[in-house]
């Protein structure tokens, strides 16, 4: 319960080696909204994307294992958020194919996703719709043997570099999912730069596709998105724990060597308190994250409240830890281009995407209401 088993320790070591390889690229790759070619090459060579597809299609385990994805992201995120995001999106964008795709769709896309030759994206958010997806305006309509997908999706990670988009659209009063290949006539438009740059853009769809482009049955779209979250939401917590640990390590390295008032900063009352508090919070977040990942592996959607809990807890911890690290590093924590500055910017969006903290807390509280006798 309190230690990862040997099979996961091997995965951690594998991911750590990849993280060490890409870390020198991070200053450039993590400050750009364009794909860094060496990051993609490193992902391909690492074969880490094999962890996000089932063994039948070239994956490493029978089913995609949330624990493996989580511990990989814990290693990748502090090394390079560009690498972390590229890895994670391979799973987030393709899991609806794993769960709801036809034999042809799975055979066509999943092995290529596992080799990182096809890049994946998931398109849910719209200009007017974020947390409350039920208000979405993108539509899917049947036109004879074809289907037509019309609408605008916004803030879509990997937009412009993805080979395909898993799109959620309204079909009558229900929601359906569809696989839209990048070469089907979509329009990608750039976004303003984010505080933590990222390959991300808006996408407009008005495309006619064969009915076989559907993912799952009509009306099954929300279920496929839920299935995706059941596996991948907890992995954001894994990334947050990795980021928080790296920030604490930076702060320790600085404060144990810098002296003020005749002794190292780390031995000054308030600084020591902050460091100890950060360490304890990281340990708590890591334990909850691993527990939630194991719950996700064993119980899937039934355990989504654990993933939600871990996601908001770990991302909030990451923000607090990074903020304290900047504080104890004084002016040296404010240097642009330094690792701590990168962590400071990168921690922030994690509390908003894949479920904002407040939205997740509301869903966890609803669950609590149900389970307490
Ligand atoms: C870096 C990044 C990458 C992204 N990648 C993708 C992607 O690949 N695909 C995709 O589809 N989307 C993506 N998004 C969009 C992301 O999913 C949305 O930003 C998120 O769902 C929140 O929606 P919103 O930003 O519209 O905030 P809103 O829904 O407008 O909410 C704003 C704030 O209001 C509060 N709030 C909202 N609802 C409630 C509530 N019920 N109770 C209490 N408080 C509430 C929260 O504090 C929330 O942060 C990405 C976003 C970012 C920043």
Image (tube, rainbow, N blue to C red):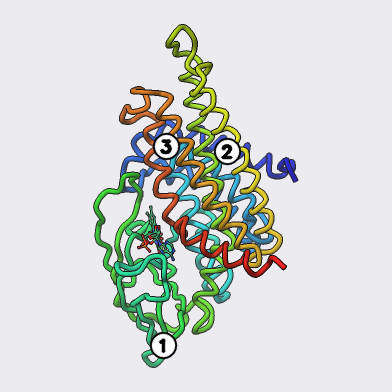
Q: Position of residue 144 (x, y in %)?
A: 39, 93
Secondary structure at numbered mark 3: helix
- Residue at coordinates 57% horizontally, 40% vertically from top-left? 15
Q: Earlier in the sequence, mark 2 or mark 1?
A: 1
Q: Earlier in the sequence, mark 2 or mark 3?
A: 2
> Taking the image as drawn, is residue 118 in sight?
no
Secondary structure at numbered mark 1: loop
> Badge 3: few (under 14), some or many (20 or more) residues near its Cα, within 10 Å?
many
Residue 113 is labelled as: none
Please identify, in this view, whether the residue under mark 2 or under mark 1 is nearer the observer.
2
Which residue was labeled with disc 2?
282
- Seen in the picture, residue 61 relative to 366 is either above or below; the reply is above
Q: Position of residue 223 (x, y in %)?
A: 55, 74
Which residue was labeled with disc 3?
343
Please identify, in this view, whether the residue under mark 2 or under mark 3 is nearer the observer.
2
Q: CA distance from mark 2 to mark 3?
A: 15 Å
Q: Position of residue 90 (x, y in %)?
A: 49, 56
Q: Earlier in the sequence, mark 3 or mark 1?
A: 1
- What quarter of the picture does the C terminus occupy? bottom right
- Tell me which image quadrant ligand 1 sits in: bottom left
Q: CA distance from mark 3 to mark 1?
A: 43 Å
- Seen in the picture, residue 362 relative to 32 is either above or below; the reply is below
Residue 172 is labelled as: 1
> Badge 1: few (under 14), some or many (20 or more) residues near its Cα, within 10 Å?
few
């Amino acid at each position: 319960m309190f230690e990862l088993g040997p099979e996961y320790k091997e995965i951690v070591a594998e991911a750590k080696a990849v993280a060490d390889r890409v870390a020198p690229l991070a200053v450039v790759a993590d400050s750009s909204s364009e794909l860094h070619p060496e990051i993609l090459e490193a992902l391909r060579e690492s074969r880490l994307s094999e962890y996000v597809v089932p063994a039948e299609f070239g994956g490493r385990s029978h089913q995609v294992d949330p624990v493996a994805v989580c511990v990989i992201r814990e290693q990748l995120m502090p090394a390079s958020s560009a690498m972390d995001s590229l890895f994670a999106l391979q799973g987030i964008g393709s899991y609806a194919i794993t769960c709801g795709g036809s034999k042809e769709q799975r055979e066509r896309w999943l092995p290529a996703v596992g080799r990182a030759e096809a890049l994946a994206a998931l398109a849910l958010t719209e200009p007017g719709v974020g947390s409350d997806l039920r208000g979405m305006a993108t539509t899917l309509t049947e036109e004879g043997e074809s289907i037509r997908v019309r609408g605008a999706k916004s803030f879509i990670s990997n937009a412009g570099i993805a080979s395909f988009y898993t799109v959620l659209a309204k079909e009558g009063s229900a929601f359906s999912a569809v696989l839209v290949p990048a070469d089907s006539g979509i329009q990608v438009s750039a976004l303003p730069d984010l505080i933590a740059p990222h390959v991300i853009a808006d996408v407009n769809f008005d495309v006619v596709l064969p009915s076989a482009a559907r993912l799952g049955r009509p009306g099954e779209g929300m279920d496929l998105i839920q299935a995706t979250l059941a596996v991948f939401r907890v992995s954001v917590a894994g990334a947050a724990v990795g980021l928080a640990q790296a920030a604490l390590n930076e702060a320790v390295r600085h404060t144990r060597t810098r002296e003020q008032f005749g002794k190292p900063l780390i031995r000054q009352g308030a600084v020591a308190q902050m460091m100890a508090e950060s360490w304890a919070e990281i340990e708590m977040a890591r334990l909850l994250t691993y527990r939630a990942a194991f719950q996700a592996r064993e119980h899937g959607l039934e355990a989504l409240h654990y993933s939600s809990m871990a996601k908001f807890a770990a991302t909030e911890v990451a923000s607090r830890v990074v903020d304290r690290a900047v504080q104890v590093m004084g002016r040296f924590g404010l240097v642009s281009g330094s690792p701590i500055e990168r962590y400071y910017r990168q921690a922030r969006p994690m509390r908003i995407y894949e479920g904002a903290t407040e939205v997740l807390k509301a869903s966890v509280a609803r669950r609590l209401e149900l389970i307490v006798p």
